[in-house]
């Protein structure tokens, strides 16, 4: 039996995770999934109850589970807290403590949603790319960092750092994923101006020699951003640093029509993973039954595929979502004229109904 830690978090996190739990409950009851659910707190809701965005109880549970399903963290009411107590520190803490270094962010355009993209259909139709983002190093974690007084004014600084071993392992992750796809890796950096990126590029070249069946190319991050909106289907797997991956994956998300459709996986060397939609907590729509739960449900699919060795059940989830879209059901963020707009709860129910069919 696999143990999964459920962390709804803040904002719409509770609503969308509730829909994913409907899917898990159905698979547990009807397909012998055998998933034991452990519930915990993280983010702002954890701070409100315990005084910490990452309580020790949650961290202990995370270390004892096979994977984690996360909703979203953050909200206006916690923005004035000291930085180390803000909800996002809970998320960063989980990534760091579990060494979830490999962040997989697929950008897939469902043909039913081609009209929802802001780009012309011929540019994005058939889009299927994977962004592999290094998640526990780089400028988000580098030291020294801070804000201090220098020469009579405030001075802010952060440090972008990567070791060879950190680059090597994310490189191996990207190449191995590419071997299961179309065998192309584009490594994104800024090696023309940043020494840390020179090391990144040199290391990727060396790692790539272990995968002669995979084509390796390099691209500067500014050009990569432009190419994503110019000709996104040229990419198969993109691998990049923490900061660049954060920006590019959100850019890629909008190619698909809605950030509400995209799941993610964050894995360590043992394939223990944290699975979450890439969108935020959206406090402005929380509690209104309008959030799109499909990215969270697709995160369950990724969990089954990458951590729990249940690819057949992952396929069932993916197919059920396609069926619901084929039937014309949409949440507000992905709706076009003539679609049947439904709420968060009904979308979860529709996916479960499609699983039965």
Image (cartoon, rainbow, N blue to C red):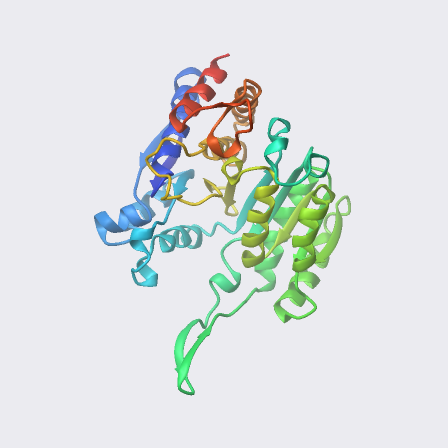
Question: Residue 5 at x, y = what percent?
Answer: 36, 38
Q: Classify 87 as above or below 308.
A: below
Is residue 53 visible in the rendered image? The answer is no
Taking the image as shown, residue 217 lies to the left or right of residue 79, namely right
Residue at (49, 17) in percent of width and height? 355
- Across and down, in percent, residue 109 comes to 62, 34
Q: Along the horizontal axis of the image, is 269 left or right of 178?
A: left
Q: How many marks?
A: 0
- What quarter of the picture does the N terminus occupy? top left
Placement of 353 over or under 1, stated as above or below: above
Residue at position x 68%, y 66% from top? 191
In this rendered view, identify the residue nearer to me: 330 or 85.
330
Is 10 situated left or right of 329 in this image? left
Q: Residue furthest front?
A: 337
Pick whichever, 5 or 224, lies toward us. Answer: 224
> In the picture shown, does residue 244 fall above or below 336?
below
Q: Quadrant of residue 346?
A: top left
Residue 276 point in image, percent of width and height: 46, 40
């Amino acid at each position: 039996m696999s143990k999964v830690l459920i962390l709804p978090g803040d904002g719409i996190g509770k609503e969308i995770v509730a829909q994913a739990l409907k899917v898990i409950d159905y698979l547990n009851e009807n397909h012998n999934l055998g998933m034991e659910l452990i519930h915990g707190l993280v983010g702002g809701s954890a701070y409100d109850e315990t005084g910490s965005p990452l309580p020790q109880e949650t961290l202990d549970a995370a270390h004892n589970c096979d994977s984690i399903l996360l909703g979203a963290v953050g909200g206006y009411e916690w923005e004035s807290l000291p930085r180390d107590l803000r909800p996002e520190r809970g998320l960063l803490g989980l990534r760091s403590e579990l060494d979830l270094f490999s962040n997989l962010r697929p950008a897939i355009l469902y043909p039913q949603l081609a009209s929802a993209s802001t780009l012309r259909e011929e540019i994005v139709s058939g889009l299927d790319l994977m962004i592999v983002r290094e998640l526990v190093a780089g400028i988000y974690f580098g030291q020294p960092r801070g804000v201090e007084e220098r020469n009579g004014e405030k001075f802010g600084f952060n440090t972008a750092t990567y070791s060879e071993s950190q680059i090597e392992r994310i490189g191996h992750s990207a190449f191995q994923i590419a071997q299961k796809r179309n065998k192309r890796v584009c490594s994104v950096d800024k090696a023309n101006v940043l020494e840390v990126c020179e090391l990144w590029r040199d290391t990727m070249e060396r790692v790539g020699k272990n995968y002669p069946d995979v084509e390796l190319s390099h691209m500067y991050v500014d050009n990569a951003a432009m190419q994503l909106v110019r000709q996104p289907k040229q990419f198969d797997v993109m691998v990049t640093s923490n900061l660049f991956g954060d920006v590019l994956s959100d850019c890629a998300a909008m190619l698909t029509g809605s950030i509400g459709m995209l799941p993610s996986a964050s894995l360590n060397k043992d394939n223990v993973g944290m699975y979450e939609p890439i969108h935020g907590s959206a406090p402005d729509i929380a509690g209104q039954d309008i959030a799109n739960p499909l990215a969270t449900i697709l995160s369950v699919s990724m969990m089954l595929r990458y951590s729990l060795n249940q690819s057949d059940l992952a396929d069932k989830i993916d197919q059920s979502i396609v069926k619901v879209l084929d039937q014309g059901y949409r949440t507000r963020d992905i709706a076009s004229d003539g679609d049947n707009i439904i709420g968060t709860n009904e979308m979860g129910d529709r996916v479960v109904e499609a699983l039965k069919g």
